[in-house]
Every structure is written in structure tokens, then in C-alpha cells.
Image (tube, coloured by chain):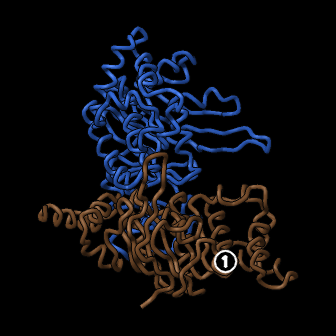
Chain colours: A blue, B brown
């Protein structure tokens, strides 16, 4: 069996601060197989986004961060790679879509030169004209009408939904093996969010891209993911297939999270504790969802 | 019948250079005393423009807004400003970071001359307790509070002036789902206790379903549909309403079934 696209084993993270060390992740393990869409769900401050930043190799460069455990990307241990090798992976083999598309594009450049930069990551010799053609093709693949006009626009001239499509096109431009999507729909309207998610699903299915989908919105996760990890205060508390999780949530925290979502069928707002000892109960793994044994 | 607040043929036109943008187009509706009226729509539908006109931040270009039967002047009087208050989406940017929570809450008391000067500090403490925070929080700065706690302070501030109508502009969209549930619960309790009227602006229809009495659906500045929450969700008349409901990400099979049923109606009608 080939190595999973991403395997994280017993990952711990702490920060040294002026007030002493702060532990953020307490040994989390997760994996993503090729072509799989895996969601990491939790509230703000649970450690979702730092996990993504470690996978990208960004936090390793921060001097105050203490990282333990292993992160393997396509069978290679990220710890053994040099900073330069990690840099070479970003934007080519792995890429990321952020929450707010408008602030992740540079407002002083038009879209075309920014797209050129992205394509140069994989092919440093690509000419401006060739990059433009390829960018136009990629933009029309994400259903942007008049891609030429979008290429000549600044990010602030496009709507939020358009910008997010540009980000999706950029993130998938170099055919990455892993796409990390950090709350990609949160800053968008519901209707635009639904369109964006459907588009993202089509795109990753077509390219067999693995996705780490980070979200606090369980509804969105249900529509998008194959498998779900629920994270609470730096610990994974439940691991299940998306179907299994929504049909049969077993951890108290997952149950609370699920019941707190207002339903469009009504039923009022339930009484839920936002802090409870029960949420610290140990990990619940559903049948058939274990972590692969370490073979590094 | 006249409600607490009535909008009659209200339009708002913004002029941008040569272009005119009609942000709100001939809208009429009433807000009844004690109800929670949700205003839903996508961005650009005119929701926030309506909120700003209700608050008197700018007057309507055409039409009138009446408060308890009297037409509101373009320049609001103090009593109008006291009666109509706002809770914004992001409490971090709506609370002054240089001012302690207590000072933020005291300001409306001073402006509107509520209570004796010597008792205002106690009043601030009671306001904090009313929204479920300890009274000692008055000495803290907004930076020392979590998102949910800050939003509670923003709610307390809107209530400090003993307001009658509170405009809630996406009050929970910046919050986690567990915190959101608790803040919504608090809003419902306060409404019962104080007899408040809410205008609840949001694009999250699942929240609307569980807190609003009536729903007004806006698209491109026009009022598409206004009805009781039950009617809107059981049998939405307008295709745009059905599209909005169908786009809500849901977590249970019952909800999927509801969405499917609404969309089938739409396809059958088309």
C-alpha cells in the first residue's frame, strides 16, 4: 500500500511566551489518503489552523514554537527536510486556501502577474504569455465568466465569491497532492458558499487532490468531507466517517457541537454548556477509522 | 394598524460619481411591538442600508419612517436615539479598545441621563449581570474578553439606555457555534424579560428559523417576501427565498429532506 498523502503522528506544539510555555496541541494524529477529503472541525482556539501551518512548514520557522511528533508528506518526514526543501514543496505539492480571499490577494497587483508568480513556482521558466494562457484556462475551469477581464482586474474589483474562485484556481494551478482549505466559505454569503464548495468538490475530484478541510461549521463539513476529525483544545476527540459522525456522534463534545447548530426545521435553541469536563473525555474512534501503523 | 416602527415606501439612492445606485427600492413594512423581525438576504441586498436608516445614521431618499405613529425626523432627537439601539457583528471593532467595559457601558447612561449619577456604577454592574457576566468585568478592557463575552458587553450597551428596539446586525456570525447558541438564548431571554423588539439582520437562515417571529426576505434592495417564520420555511412563495433556504449547510437528514422538498417545488414550477 502506498503511503498516505499526509500522516501526522502524535503531533505536539507549544509556544514559549513571556508568561511561560503554552501547550497548544497535545499529541494529535491524523492521516489523509490520496484523493480523500478530510475535515478537521473545532471551535476557535482548538488548534485547527496551527496544525495546517505545521503541515505547510511555516511554524517550524518560528523560534518560539516547540514541535514534537512526526509529520509525513507523501512518505517523507518533514522534519528531515531542510528549510529549502520544505519551501520547494509549498505552492507546488501542497497549497492552501485561506478564509478571507480578498486579503490573501495582493491589492496593488492585477490578478495576471500574481497568477504568473504562482505558475513560476512549478515552472520557473514559464513566459508571461504562456502563464496568461494557462491562467485564463484555469479561471474558466472554476466558472469565472470572462477570465481575460478577471486577469486584468485588481482583487478589490472582484466580488468575494470571484476572489475565492481565483484562489481555488491558483491553489490547484500546480496540481498539488494536498490542498489545505482553512474555512474557505466563512467570509462568503450562504448561496456563494454553497457554489464555492460545490466547485471545490468538483475540482478536487477531477484532479484527485487530497484535501485537509478546516472548519467550525458542521453543516459545511457534512456537505464536503469523506472523513472527519473533531478537535477540542488541542486534542482529537472523535474520528469517524462523515456519515458515521452525523448519524451517530459518540463524544460528548461532538454531541454538544452538533446540537448547538440551529436547524432550519426549527426546534428552538438548546441549552448547552460551552465548557464542560465531559469534553475532555478520551478519543472515540469509529469502526474502520484507525490510524495507519507507523512505517517511517 | 400601525406598528412600533413603520416604513412606508422607503427608498435609498446613493450617488457614486455619475452613477446612481438604488440600494433600497420602495420598501414598506411594519415592526410590531415585542416581535423579532428577521431581515435576510445576501450581501448587497440592502439589509444594512435599512438598518442604518432605522437607526437614523442617514435618512431615506424617499418615503418615511415612523416611530409609534410619528414620522421620524432626518436628524433624530435624543429620545429617538435612546429608544433605538444597535448591536454590531464584530464586537472587537465596535467596542472602544481604549475604554474599559464599564466606561463603555456608562457612556449611554451619562448621555441619556439615566439614573442618579451616584448609582450609575451599580447600574453598570447590574447590566453586566443581566447579560450573564460578573460585575467585576467593568474594570476589564475589551481585549481581555473572549468573543462571546465581548458580544454580551455589546448587548448590555444596547440595553443600557433602556431601549425599546434593538437592531441586531449579524450579532452571532463571528462566534463559534456553542457560543452562538448561548448568545441567542440570552437574546431570547432578554426580549421576554424587557419586552424588547428586535430587528435581526442576518444571512444565516437556520438562526432565523429558531429566533424570529417574522421574516422579511430582501434581494437587490427589494422586499421579496414577508411572512411568519413558519410560513416562510414551510411554504416559501418566492423562488429567491427557496434558493436561500436551499443553500444553508445542514446537519440532519430531516433538514436535507426539507431542502429537497423546497427545491422540487421550484423545479416543478419552472
Q: Foreground: A102 or A203?
A: A102
Q: Foreground: A273 or B110?
A: B110
In the rendered image of this protein, does residue A93 appear above or below residue B87?
Answer: above
Q: Is residue A287 visible?
A: no
In the rendered image of this protein, does residue A196 appear above or below residue B104?
Answer: above
In this rendering, would A119 be left or right of B179?
A: left
Tag count in the figure? 1
Taking the spot 45% from the left edge, 59% from the top edge, the residue there is B13
Tell which subunit mark 1 falls on: B
Q: Residue under circle 1?
A: B77
Taking the spot 33% from the left edge, 78% from the top edge, the residue there is B227
Q: Is residue A207 visible?
A: yes
In this rendering, would B185 be left or right of B109?
A: left
Q: Position of residue B149 (x, y in %)?
A: 65, 64
Element on which disc 1 rests: loop
In this rendering, would A228 be left or right of A46?
A: left
Q: Position of residue B6 (x, y in %)?
A: 46, 80
Taking the spot 52% from the left edge, 77% from the top edge, the residue there is B198
Q: Position of residue A86 (x, y in %)?
A: 52, 20
Quadrant occupied by the N terminus of chain B: bottom left
In the rendered image of this protein, does residue B6 appear above or below residue A256?
Answer: below
Amino acid at each position: 500500500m502506498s503511503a498516505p498523502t499526509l500522516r501526522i503522528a502524535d503531533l505536539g506544539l507549544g509556544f514559549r511566551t513571556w508568561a511561560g510555555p503554552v501547550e497548544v496541541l497535545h499529541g494529535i494524529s491524523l492521516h489523509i489518503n490520496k484523493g480523500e477529503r478530510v475535515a478537521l472541525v473545532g471551535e476557535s482556539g482548538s488548534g485547527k489552523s496551527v496544525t495546517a501551518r505545521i503541515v505547510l512548514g511555516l511554524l517550524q520557522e518560528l523560534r518560539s514554537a516547540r514541535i514534537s511528533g512526526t509529520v509525513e508528506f507523501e512518505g517523507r518526514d518533514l522534519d528531515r527536510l531542510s528549510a529549502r526543501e520544505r519551501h520547494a514543496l509549498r505552492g507546488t505539492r501542497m497549497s492552501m486556501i485561506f478564509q478571507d480571499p480578498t486579503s490573501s490577494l495582493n491589492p496593488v497587483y492585477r490578478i495576471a502577474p500574481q497568477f504568473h508568480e504562482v505558475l513560476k513556482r512549478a515552472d520557473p521558466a514559464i513566459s508571461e504569455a504562456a502563464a496568461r494562457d494557462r491562467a485564463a484556462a484555469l479561471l474558466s475551469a472554476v466558472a469565472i465568466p470572462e477570465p481575460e477581464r478577471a486577469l486584468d482586474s485588481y482583487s478589490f474589483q472582484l466580488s468575494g465569491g470571484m476572489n475565492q474562485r481565483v484562489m481555488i484556481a491558483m491553489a490547484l494551478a500546480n496540481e498539488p497532492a494536498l490542498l489545505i482549505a482553512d474555512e474557505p466559505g466563512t467570509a462568503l454569503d450562504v448561496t456563494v458558499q454553497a457554489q464555492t464548495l460545490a466547485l471545490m468538490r468538483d475540482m478536487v475530484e477531477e484532479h484527485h487532490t487530497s484535501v485537509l478541510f478546516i472548519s467550525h461549521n458542521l453543516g459545511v463539513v457534512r456537505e464536503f468531507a469523506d472523513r472527519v476529525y473533531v478537535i477540542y483544545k488541542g486534542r482529537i476527540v472523535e474520528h469517524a466517517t462523515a456519515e458515521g459522525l452525523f448519524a451517530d456522534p459518540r463524544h460528548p463534545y461532538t454531541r454538544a457541537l452538533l446540537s448547538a447548530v440551529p436547524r432550519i426545521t426549527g426546534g428552538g435553541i438548546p441549552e448547552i454548556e460551552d465548557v464542560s469536563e465531559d469534553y475532555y473525555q478520551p478519543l472515540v474512534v469509529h469502526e474502520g477509522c484507525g490510524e495507519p501503523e507507523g512505517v517511517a | 394598524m400601525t406598528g412600533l416602527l413603520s416604513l412606508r415606501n422607503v427608498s435609498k439612492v446613493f450617488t457614486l460619481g455619475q452613477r446612481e445606485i438604488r440600494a433600497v427600492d420602495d420598501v414598506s413594512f411594519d415592526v410590531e411591538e415585542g416581535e423579532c423581525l428577521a431581515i435576510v438576504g445576501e450581501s448587497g441586498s440592502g439589509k444594512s442600508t435599512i438598518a442604518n436608516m432605522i437607526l437614523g445614521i442617514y435618512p431615506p431618499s424617499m418615503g418615511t419612517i415612523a416611530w409609534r405613529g410619528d414620522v421620524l425626523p432626518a436628524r433624530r432627537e435624543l429620545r429617538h436615539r435612546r429608544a433605538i439601539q444597535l448591536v454590531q457583528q464584530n464586537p472587537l471593532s465596535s467596542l472602544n479598545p481604549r475604554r474599559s467595559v464599564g466606561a463603555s457601558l456608562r457612556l449611554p447612561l451619562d448621555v441619556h441621563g439615566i439614573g442618579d449619577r451616584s448609582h450609575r456604577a451599580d447600574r453598570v454592574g447590574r447590566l453586566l449581570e443581566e447579560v450573564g457576566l460578573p460585575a467585576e468585568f467593568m474594570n476589564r478592557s475589551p481585549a481581555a474578553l473572549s468573543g462571546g463575552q465581548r458580544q454580551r458587553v455589546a448587548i448590555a450597551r444596547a440595553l443600557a439606555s433602556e431601549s425599546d428596539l434593538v437592531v441586531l446586525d449579524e450579532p452571532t456570525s463571528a462566534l463559534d457555534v456553542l457560543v452562538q447558541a448561548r448568545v441567542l438564548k440570552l437574546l431570547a431571554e432578554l426580549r421576554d424579560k424587557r419586552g424588547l423588539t428586535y430587528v435581526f439582520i442576518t444571512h444565516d437562515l437556520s438562526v432565523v428559523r429558531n429566533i424570529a417571529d417574522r421574516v422579511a426576505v430582501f434581494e437587490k434592495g427589494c422586499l421579496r417576501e414577508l411572512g411568519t417564520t413558519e410560513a416562510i420555511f414551510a411554504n416559501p412563495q418566492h423562488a429567491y427565498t427557496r434558493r436561500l433556504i436551499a443553500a444553508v449547510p445542514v446537519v440532519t437528514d430531516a433538514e436535507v429532506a426539507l431542502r429537497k422538498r423546497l427545491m422540487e417545488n421550484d423545479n416543478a414550477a419552472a
